[in-house]
Image (spheres, helix red, strand yellow):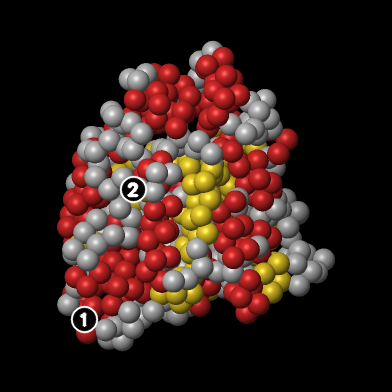
Amino acid sequence: MLRITGGKVYDPANDVNGEVRDVCISDGRIVDEVTGADVRTIDAAGMVVFPGGVDVHTHVAGGAINFARAMTPENHRVAAKFIHSPELRAGVGGTTPSTFATGYLYAGLGYTTVNEAAVPVLSARHTHEELRDTPLVDKSCCVLMANNELILDLLEEGETERAKHLLAWHLWAAKGYGVKAVNPGGVTAWKWGKDAKILSEPVPGYSKVTPAKIISSMAAMVDELELPHPMHLHCNNLGAPGNIDTTIETMKVLDGHRAHMAHLQFHSYGGDDWDTLRSESVRLAEFFNEQPNLTADAGAILFGDSVTITADGPWQHLLYQLTGRKWGNLDVENETGCGVVPYTYKGTNMVNAVQWAVGLELLLLIDDPWRIYLTTDHPNGACFWRYPEIIHLLMNADFRRECIEKLPEKALKRIHLPGIDREYTLSEIAIIISAGPARALGMPQKGHLGVGADADVALDNDDPDRERMFGHPRYLLKGGEVVVEEGDIRKMVDGREYIVRPSFDKNIEEYLRPLFEQYYTMSFDNYPVEMERLEGADIRECG
């Protein structure tokens, strides 16, 4: 048992805004009170007390991030190293940290839950094995579905109900938590050397299946299955000048169905080409504010080295052509694809300067912090361990202006950030890094400090330098265990993995088995992930 006393508590889910109050913990949960001689007390005077951070969109395990790790040995040579010790396993940080280092670095920010945002079913087994090697955080993952040819074939034939059962079966087979839609139809088109840029045009190889049909059908399936997390959507035309029209059209296509719009910064551009690229964050925010069915994460970028990884193969090939950097491309049989390109964001580059501004603008212009969350689409926009830099920019308008003054003059004419004076409060920061993402993921035990919540608690010095404050928590509790103390990792815990078991017609397997024999390299019986691959699985029944 443990009592945290004397700290300023920020728990927006329970309307607690900086009150000095005790937080009591027993058996891994928040409780009303603890008593007895064995109660440990942490004096949190001069500290702020937050629920543990929740990252709604990151890439930390599986084939894509491993591909990126292998492609960038030069980054590992200069990255921070973790030396083997009684508490720590060896590892490396940098733009694509190794698995153990990923857990250590998240804990070093006060984060306790992460959502791996893109997992092919075919390689899900490997992803879960890597998640087992990522300590100190609870995990969930979203399964790539929007270019699965078996599902698209059923949509082409008008068999939407069977497609829903097939989607549910795949989600359980992968032991996933949510459904991910990346460039719907576009990844399938990439197998023909094409893309799907217009939502109303048929996907190559089909006559009736369009990106719009995939988006609307899949969002409806997710709602009908009553999954806790809405469809996790990577829109078409990511990164392209003028893609604001596609993004707003996509929101209209959803027609009231729930969706989480991933890395919104990369989908908020105006202009006709790279020379005329401009921010359309105001237009995007105004429309988004009127769509209560939607949540989003920022996908902000920061200047410096990164590695872009995505299932959006056509975009990655274009980025390779633009940069001349290394390029990796993978085709995942009938399901999806993957592209990897190292990239360096430069403050002197007009396009990168606009991208930097757009991410901040969205966080500042979308008026409800419960619906827009802090991410960098790790490692695409920047590594997650740079989140404190963004928090400092959001909380300090003067510092923001100093950074804006360093941008190219050409970029200043294309952004809205200089005219935005809003500063985030500590309570709003608690929403965008913890309470909001937990609610979007449908995890009622996360993101708050109310009775019954998981005892995931971060304690930070109340430092006016918010970057330093959020980059070095004094204490972190994971499931009631003190894992970070006085800034150092003191104890290892494995964390749980959250999965869903949606209801589906068991006869779907009779339909699937011959298709596997015809189209897959893996046998049907070896395809689903076994439960023993997961560490401490927490199963939610759905539908």
Residue named by callout 1: 410
* Residue 436 seen in the current view: no
Secondary structure, mark 1, is: helix
* Residue 324 seen in the current view: yes
Q: Residue furthest front?
A: 192
Residue at coordinates 22% horizontally, 66% vertically from top-left?
273
Residue at coordinates 17% horizontally, 57% vertically from top-left?
283
Compared across the picture, whether 328 is left or right of 103 comes to left
Residue 279's quadrant in the figure?
bottom left
Q: Which mark is residue 195?
A: 2
Q: Position of residue 266 (x, y in %)?
A: 33, 60
Q: Is residue 515 above or below residue 122?
A: above
Compared across the picture, whether 539 is left or right of 376 comes to right
Secondary structure, mark 2, is: loop
Q: Position of residue 467 (x, y in %)?
A: 46, 76
Residue at coordinates 55% horizontally, 29% vertically from top-left?
519
